[in-house]
Image (cartoon, rainbow, N blue to C red):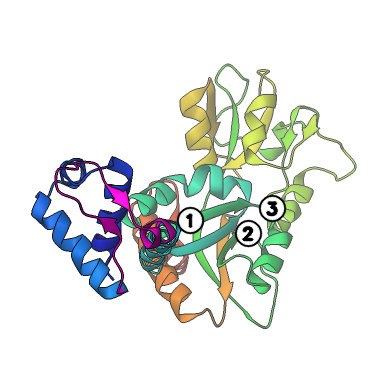
Amino acid sequence: MTYEQIETFLTVVTCGNITAAANELFVTQSTVSSRIQSLENELGAPLLIRAKGHHSVELTGYGQSFVPIASQWTSLWKHTQSLKAAADISVLTIASIDSVNNYTLVRLFNQHIERNPNIKLRIHTHHSNEIHGLVQNRIADIGFVFSRVNYPNIISRPVYRELMYLICRKDGPYHDNMECAELSTENEVFLRWGQDYQQWHDRFWSPDRQPAVTVNTGSTLQQFLNKPVRWAIAPMSIIHQLSHKSDLTYYKLKTPPPPRICYEIRDRNPTLGQQKAIDIFHRELEDYIDSSPDICTFEDWMLRENAD
């Protein structure tokens, strides 16, 4: 039995006659009759009662019993075809912190979706400590974090770094090359960007002095930089997005925070199917970082540091 034979039989049953079925299938009446005859020969029993002068179709008892079987057969056939198509689809799960998903790698994710329709991205936002566990347990294929934690089955590599700047309103009292001592924590919108950042922060402002507000995501900063005296520290990828949509600007500090280093983490032994999707994403990630004005590859940064 073929799909064309079963489809033709069910179309004849639905249309009520061979002429209408032929029009529905865009074939000749003789083709419809030939397919039905071939199906009957395979089954070893007639499906239709053929009588001269009758345009409408009448089913034999066997034909009536065969209708639900034919319907189930076509359903199973279509399902097997969808499975064949799904075999070429890969799902790549990426877990990142808020600033990576909402700012730094947004354009990369969109480019990857357009270029690789057979790789479906699942993008989740978590804190760094949660992301290590997701990759360790193979819930996520790739993670982007700003801290390193040693896990036996995780490979961690620095992929880019970005500089940190003072961000504030354009009508604020701030300027380039400010001394940190000129900034009051009473007006700070604080976000802990990592352990290195916290150590830098504690050098200039006592941990006992409370900021105006503390937030835990980069996307929240803009909501509280609503007064001229308010200020925050943020990486360039976030500043670039915020400054285009509001009255915010940014300045260099005389003693800036250490650059923010992003690490890519992944399982040491991915499946062969996942490895292909991961390799494709890696190549596009490297090209993206090379072309991005806001971030720099970790290797390029190290070369510059050594040159200086």
Crowding at dot 3, Cα within 10 Å, few <14 / some 14-19 / many 20+, comes out as: some
Does dot 2 land on a helix, a strand or a loop? loop
Pinpoint residue 71: horizontal percent, then vertical percent.
41, 56
Residue lying at the far front of the rendered structure: 52
Bounds of the magenta segment:
44-67
Judged by depth in the image, the label closer to the viewer, 2 or 1, is 1
Q: Which amino acid does label 2 sit on?
A: Phe
Disc number for residue 197: 3
Residue located 54% across and 34% down the image: 251
109 shown above or below 205? below
* Res. 185 image quadrant: top right
Circle 1 Cα neighbour tier, 10 Å, few/some/many (<14 / 14–19 / ≥20): some
User: Considering only order in the chain, which callout, 3 or 2, is on the residue closer to the N terminus?
Assistant: 2
For numbered disc 3, what is the local secondary structure? helix
Q: In which quarter of the image is residue 86?
A: bottom left
Nearest to viewer (mark 2 / mark 3):
2
Disc 2 from disc 3: Cα separation:
11 Å
Residue visible at 69% across and 39% down in the picture: 180
Name the side, left or right, on which 117 lies relative to 194.
left
Pointer 2 or 1: first along the chain: 1
Circles 3 and 1: CB atoms closer than 8 Å: no
Q: Name the residue under label 2.
A: 146
Q: On the picture, is 71 further left or further right than 216?
A: left
Is the C-beta separation of discs 2 and 1 under 8 Å? no
In front: mark 3 or mark 1?
A: 1
For the C terminus, the quadrant is bottom left
Instruction: Give the residue drawn at x 53%, y 67%.
Output: 158
Compared with 294, 71 (above or below) is below
**Relative to 5, is 225 above or below?**
above
Q: What element carries label 1?
A: strand
